[in-house]
Image: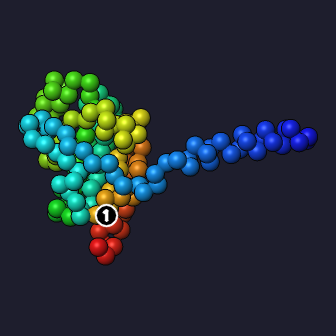
Amino acid sequence: MNTRHRTFLALLLALPLAACAGRDDSRKAPDFALSSPDGKTVSLSAQKGRVVLLNFWATWCDSCRAELPALKDLNARSNGRFVLLAVNVDEDPGKAVPPFLAREKLDFPIAYADPAVLGAYAVRDLPTTFLIGPDGEIKRRYVGPLDEGAVENDILQLLRRPS
């Protein structure tokens, strides 16, 4: 391989590193204040010091609907030890979400997403869920339906850590 090819290959291999160099690796979860179906405000900062499971979902998403029993179960067994926040990304949530909630009887906070929050969390697939530690840092990102046992284990590990 001649010098020109080696140089090109080295530059090509270095591109991903250069793309990451400017990113903030603090992993702090971006704060938000979003409207809920009942007109209240749901914010991440209100959960400061707590473990938060932040779930992005939609009523039309089959995988989102499939993981609902796991989310309900985790929330029911949490005894308030962590907070589950579900952020809906439907195009017209005011129309789609209320009947869905009436049917599903969800007992955890629901909020309506806005483009800024979706961008801040880089949500591209649904469902996408983040596990946020009491320090406000994103500890895990799950894409696709949750494995209830694995998520519960991750939550318990965070709850066992000293503050």
The quadrant of the image that shows the N terminus is top right
Q: Residue furthest right?
A: 2
Secondary structure at numbered mark 1: loop
Q: How is the image coloured?
A: rainbow
Q: Is residue 52 above or below residue 112?
A: below
Q: Which image quadrant for residue 96?
A: top left
Residue 128 visible in this rendered orientation of the protein: no
Q: Residue furthest front?
A: 22
The image shows a total of numbered marks equal to 1
Q: Identify the residue shown where x is 37% and y is 62%.
A: 154
Q: Would residue 3 appear left or right of 61 to someone viewing this image?
A: right
Q: Position of residue 89 (x, y in %)?
A: 28, 32
Q: Position of residue 158 (x, y in %)?
A: 33, 66
Q: Which image quadrant for residue 92?
A: top left
Residue 13 visible in this rendered orientation of the protein: yes
Q: Give the residue pinned by disc 1.
A: 135
Q: Identify the residue shown where x is 16% and y is 63%.
A: 79
Q: Identify the residue shown where x is 41% and y is 39%.
A: 122
Q: Is residue 156 above or below residue 91?
A: below
Q: Position of residue 162 (x, y in %)?
A: 31, 76
Q: Is residue 107 above or below residue 49?
A: above
CA neighbours of label 1 inside 10 A, class few (<14), some (14 to 19), many (20+): some
Q: Identify the residue shown where x is 29% and y is 73%.
A: 163
Q: Which image quadrant for residue 6?
A: top right
In depth, the one of 46 and 101 nearer the eye is 46
In depth, the one of 122 and 66 nearer the eye is 122
Q: Would residue 24 appear left or right of 155 to someone viewing this image?
A: right
Type of the residue with mark 1: Asp
Q: Position of residue 106 (x, y in %)?
A: 16, 43
